[in-house]
Every structure is written in C-alpha cells, then in structure tokens.
Image (cartoon, rainbow, N blue to C red):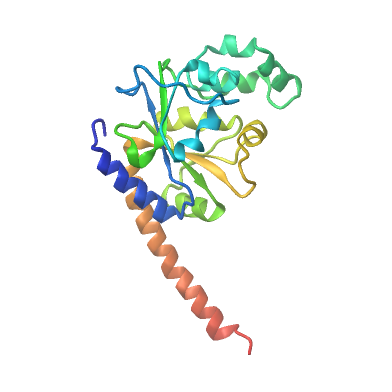
Amino acid sequence: MKGTPVNDFAELAHQLRDLLGLEEAPVGVTFDAADADDPDPVPHRPAGCCFWEPAQRGRLDTTAGDHANCSVGSYTHGLIPLEAAAARADTGALVGSGWVSEADLVAAPALDFTPASITYQPLADAADPQVVLARLTPASLMRLHSAVPGLKLAGKPQCAIVPLAQRGTVAVSPGCAVSRTRTGLADTDMTCALPAQELPAIVERLRAAVAADQVVSAYAAADIEANFATG
C-alpha cells in the first residue's frame, strides 16, 4: 500500500473505528517517514508505548533518544541491540524481579532494521504507515477475532506487538504491568497492532463479521423477549 493517498487511510480509520466500536482514534506508525528528517522535539516520556495515546490526537516524530528510558522497548523497536538492552539497569530490574527471563528477552520480537525516526499520528492523517495501533475493549476484540481468527495474543512486553504487525501479523496484547503503569491504560482496555498493508482486507472481513453478529444478536434478543421475558 506504499503511496496510498491520505484520504484512503482517513476512510479506513473511520471504518475501523466504526466496525470495532473504538472510543479512541486508531494510530498509524511510520518508520523513517519521508517528511520526518528534522523532527520537532517531543515531550519526554518514560517509554515508547507512552506515545501511543497522545498520537490519537496529533503527530509525534520520535527518534531513538525519545525511547531511551525503556531499554526493552528500544530493543523491540530496533533502536538498540539486544546486548545493549540486556546490560542496562532497567532491564536488570525486570529480569531480577522474575518478571521476564533472559530467555524471554532473546525470544521477544524486534524490528530487524534500525529506524532513524518513528512517527506516531492519527491513522486518518497518515500517508504511508506500516503499523496501525488501536485500543480495544472485550467487545471490539470479539469482533476482531471473528474477522481474524488467527490473530496472535502477544505476551510481555506489550510493545512487541509493533514488530509483529510490521512483519504482517495481527497481534493483540492484554498489556503488561510495566506498560500499564507507565501509560495508565484502563483495566478494561487492551491494544492491538495491525499490518497497515492488510487493513483494507481486515476491514472487509470485519464488515462481514459485524453483520453476522448483528443477525445473531437480533435473534438472541427476540428469543429472550418471546420466551424468557417476565411480566
């Protein structure tokens, strides 16, 4: 979908939000955006996942330094090698607590390239995103799973869903303790990452899944009214 006009993503963003019942705008993630050569400074954040929520409202062009406070997130986003991440104090605290093991770190998905910049912005404004992020409720996860039954439930760290989607996998994370604490993600919410190039096909499958849900929900409601309603 390289070079897709902005308006196409605006329409896809509208449809995705409507079909999944999203309360917040989906976010487009672009690696090495053509117009991000000289990014404006962004507010200091404790981790890359902390850019996801403000990017629902406006564009953020980030560099490796903006992600540096979270070594594991810097690794999953291809910004530092695993050896560097493993040697840092914050990673040592995670491993030392038993939250993750060294084997978990080795197995964690990561981008296989080093982006000079990572742009987060409302999907409706994105010109050429590689990954789409959306905040889900259980009901929206139900719809997405109906449309993409092979989606991957990703473990910790939550930011691993970004490289998974960049490789073509629809990934959902229930969140991780570190990311939830840093971002203030509500207990009722979780995050998914979608490959941007697959978004038109995903939206089509969502449309069919939601239509089927509406039919069976109407049947169930009529059944309750006819057979189980109390006077």
Please state the horizontal and vertical placement of residue 95, each as a whole percent of the image: 71, 20
Q: State the image quarter where residue 116 is shown.
A: top left
Q: Quick one: 167 or 174, which is closer to the camera? A: 174
Quarter location, residue 131: top left
Q: Is residue 62 above or below residue 50?
A: above
Residue at figure coordinates x 41%, y 17% from the top left:
115
Left or right: 170, with 205 as reference point = right
Quadrant, the N terminus:
top left
Residue sitting at x 29%, y 22%:
34
Q: Is residue 135 visible?
A: yes
Residue 47 occupies which quadrant of the picture?
Answer: top right
Q: Quadrant of the C terminus?
A: bottom right
**Which x, y percent locates residue 20?**
44, 53
Q: Taking 88 as reference, is 16 left or right? A: left
Residue located 45% across and 69% down the image: 216
Location of residue 163 in the rendering, given as x and y in whole percent from the top left corner: 46, 27
- Residue positioned most to the bottom: 231
- Residue furthest right in the image: 97
| Any part of residue 200 in sight | no
Give coordinates of residue 153: x percent, y percent.
Answer: 54, 39
> How many discs mark residues in the rendered view?
0
